[in-house]
Amino acid sequence: MTRVLVVDDEAPILRALRINLTAREYQVTTANDGASGLAAMARDRPDVLILDLGLPDMDGIEVIKGVRGWTATPIIVLSAWGQESQKVAALDAGADDYVTKPFGMDELLARLRAAVRRASPAPDEPVVVTPDFTVDLAAKRVVSDGADVRLTPTEWQLLEVLVRHAGRLVTQRQLLAEVWGPQYQSEANYLRVYAAQLRRKLEPDPSRPRYLLTEPGMGYRFQPGSPESGPGRSS
Amino acid sequence: MTRVLVVDDEAPILRALRINLTAREYQVTTANDGASGLAAMARDRPDVLILDLGLPDMDGIEVIKGVRGWTATPIIVLSAWGQESQKVAALDAGADDYVTKPFGMDELLARLRAAVRRASPAPDEPVVVTPDFTVDLAAKRVVSDGADVRLTPTEWQLLEVLVRHAGRLVTQRQLLAEVWGPQYQSEANYLRVYAAQLRRKLEPDPSRPRYLLTEPGMGYRFQPGSPESGPGRSS
DNA sequence: GGCCGGCATTAAGAACACGTCAAGATCATC
DNA sequence: GATGATCTTGACGTGTTCTTAATGCCGGCC
């Protein structure tokens, strides 16, 4: 079920959106100013953000920038004014689409579908296999030695971020922002605790990790195959 | 350079788009009906398609479907009519955005930038190859002789700055400011220590550097290939 | 030839980051 | 309201990384 966060300070619009989106089986949460909108983004992690630019407490462009600071979640902007310069500013700040009020509900829904469709690209290879375990991103399952491995929600999220960037180094800031939320970007403690738990559950030898590698001072890396330690592997 | 295909049957619009897009360093090709538009998509493989729905030979929706049959290239639809049902149909057929004529050129350009930005999360070529090692900026990884080279955070930052300015001289002040911070601009010692460490890890002969060159009194330079100074060195 | 400044190299202590453990707090479930 | 699982938080030992200073080298310059 797709989760949508609507940030708007006008009650009628909020109400209309909530009714229409809920009827189409979207899961809707709302906020009515910029600050609580940003907080809700971090807390709820919606799949799409519908954002009114005319908020009472802060400039909508700043909200866009705040969101773009840590996530690529699609943003559809609503705005009462037809000012072209504002459209340009919002789009260049990272918005995905821009709809001027009054808008047709059917059009907004279609643009919403388009945004969601783009954001979830064809699940190329949602299954990652290593010699010791298999991660099925779509089914949210990990199998090791033919048996399911039980992961807590936080453990799973951390593993998912790492696996989605397989082979690439993911910085601590990014991991913390994506798993715990942008306000946790300095709690590197959490990473150590959960990296250790994942290793205990997945690594054949948890004390000498082969897949969940630490890059001291920088972050972590999920190494899927292991082109290493093989003697004389040319190329 | 981003390549744009514009499919439209109205000469003035085609002309305006060509002028504006070319001025912004886009590479523009055009077609003026659906059939030749589809052919041009297959032939030119543009990065974005700007498509007018009102074409003489076929329904624009069919063009969208035809394109979506084999590629996810972003499609921005232009249309003269404000019919909401047509917007919905176009978006649901796979269009990424929908702009109604008359449109502001600045807005269209902003929407174009947004579409391109979404489609190419990797903006440039983040891999630099030399005969002796490979630097992958995106993965934050250096491979030499098929094996990973471990770099500390400071070593990596220094290398990254140099590689990002490959071939060009980077002054000591700039290096110190970018790696250690602006208040360290006189600590040239740090540079010597870390340049030496990088050379020890990357250069085939650290005492006679081939890639991390010192420019005495000025700074350092990363020399990627080596089209340099090779006086018939029969290696 | 001797002097001097900039660079390379090395080594040591200090500062920091990591992995680990365990206890308290919170949440979900019944 | 009790129970079990999960998450948060702090402390500690260990290993790595950063900083800093000392030394030697090479060039240009007087």
Image (cartoon, coloured by chain):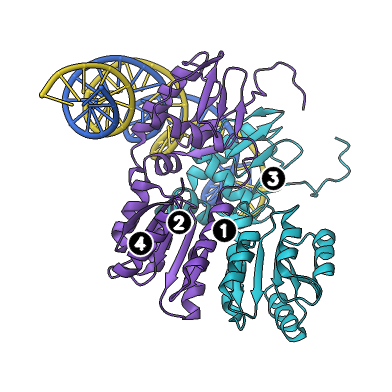
Chain colours: A purple, B cyan, C blue, D yellow
- Numbered label attached to residue B128: 3
Determine the secondary structure under disc 2: helix
Which residue position holds label 4? A7
Determine the secondary structure under disc 3: strand
Q: CA–CA distance between discs 2 and 4?
A: 15 Å
Q: CA–CA distance between discs 2 and 1?
A: 19 Å
Q: Quadrant of residue B21?
A: bottom right
Q: CA–CA distance between discs 3 and 1?
A: 36 Å
- Please state the horizontal and vertical placement of residue A216, each as a whole percent of the image: 47, 31
Foreground tag (3 vs 2) = 2
Determine the secondary structure under disc 1: helix
Same subunit, tags 2 and 1: yes
Pointer 2 chain: A
Q: Quadrant of the N terminus of chain B?
A: bottom right
Which residue position holds label 2? A68
Q: Nearer the viewer, residue B131 or C25?
A: C25
The amino acid type found where label 1 is placed reads Ala
Q: Quadrant of the C terminus of chain B?
A: top right
Pointer 4 chain: A
Q: Residue at image x 70%, y 78%?
A: B23
- Please state the horizontal and vertical placement of residue A24, each as a whole percent of the image: 46, 54
Q: Is residue A48 left or right of residue B198?
A: left
- Numbered label attached to residue A114: 1
Q: Residue at image x 64%, y 63%?
A: B95
